[in-house]
Image: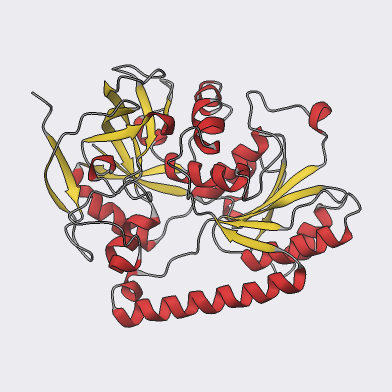
Amino acid sequence: MPPENSAAWLPAKSGKPLKVGPAPYTSPAASEIVVKNGAVAINPVDWAKQLMGNMLLGQIKYPFIIGEDVAGEVVEVGSKVQRFRMGDRVLGHAMAVAPGSNKPAEGGFQKYTVIREMYAASIPEWISYEQACVLPLTLSTAAYGLFHKDFLALDSAPTVPPPPPTVIGNNRAIFITGGSSSVGSNAIQLAVSAGYQVYATASPKNFAYVEKLGATRVFDYHSTTVIDDVITALNGKTLAGAYASIGGIDTCIKILGQVNHDSKTGANKNLVAVSGFGLPAQRQLSTSAGTATFMASTIWTLGRNAILSLLRGVRFKFVDGKDFLEDDNVVSRLVYRDFLPRALAARQFVPAPEPLVVGQGLDRIQEAMEVHEKGVSAKKVVVLL
């Protein structure tokens, strides 16, 4: 008899609250594992999907199980799985909402989730499930923007230990906005592990946190002189591009445009990888008029940045994850297979940001989504299962 499964279902396109109820237990395909979830984390896409309906992830068929970040114990493995066995402690990027999946069995908000082997990694005993589950989606997003050939395509992969300056030179740098955000926290650690100096922005209250992750310098994103300050700090550096992890596209464009214009190396890249916008409050997205206002504002901002990018000779591109599901892709190979298990075991890479545990049980996921929607800083909202 298979285990009894249950889930927090998204019942319809604007289904709120999530409905907790029975769910099928799905055995893994050849290259998949099943994880009994010990903790799951919340991402902006979860509550935004609930509020915006089919304007976001319109491919989803209801009822559906969303959720991308899980950590727990492997309870079943597919016939071709080589890296895991039953009883292993793992984290996993649940791919239910990825284009090409659309399978509730791969959603995170349930007791048992099917995870593709290439998007799972073993976790050492010193990392709890609530700590581990903060990583997957934002780790994948950060890695895609840094290493994929269509984005920054950094010329060295993250290694344990990081490559020494004597091998790769000590003047390679990358600029990252939102250093204390979930994507920013992962991007900083990955870039440092690949041998790059990181110059980042954050709120002053989070400076120490961002520096602890490995940033060389941190700047106040509210400062009226932040652009000049970063440009001055980057003097003599080879800038490999910029990553706008949460807003700040215009800041990245202006810095890249100026630094690259002044550079004599010719090695800089005129690209800003963008992982997303800050989303407005629930009260705005919960009405048609509010959603329309948000969309109009987004289009205006994108248009303004497009003009700025043309004037400064700098491109920006949203991290789309379009080939997340391709076998042996750059994220699954460089990060989940080759780097992350060793880096976690060596404590070179740490789960970040810190988990903010809202409660325990599938029935607390809706509350957790609402906590996240109200805003958190240098934290990621988590529910224990």
The image position of residue 40, as x and y in percent, is 31, 41
* Apparent side of residue 315 relative to residue 105 in the rendered image (left or right): right
Q: Position of residue 10 (x, y in %)?
A: 20, 55
Instruction: Please say whether residue 366 is visible from this viewpoint.
Output: yes
Q: Which residue is drawn at 50% across and 60% down?
A: 276
**Up/down of 259 relative to 121, above or below:** below
Instruction: Judge from the rendering whether residue 127 lies leftward or rightward of residue 67; answer left or right.
Output: right
Which corner quadrant holds the N terminus? top left
Nearer the observer, 126 or 349: 349
Give the answer, above or below, for where 217 lies relative to 194: below
Q: In this view, does 18 lie to the left or right of 51?
A: left
Q: Residue at left 55%, top 37%?
A: 330
Q: Can residue 213 be seen in this view?
A: no
Left or right: where does residue 4 sit relative to residue 235? left
Q: Position of residue 273 (x, y in %)?
A: 61, 55
- When asked about the image quadrant of residue 356, the answer is top left
Residue that appears at 46% across and 34% down: 327
Q: Is residue 257 above or below residue 360?
A: below
Number of numbered discs on residues:
0
Give the image quarter of residue 205: bottom right
Residue 45: x and y, percent? Answer: 37, 57
Closest to the observer, 146 or 99 = 99
Identify the image quadrant of the C terminus: top left
Q: Which colour scheme is used?
A: secondary structure
Q: Which residue lies furthest to the left in this view?
A: 1
Q: In this view, does 89 lie above or below 314?
A: above
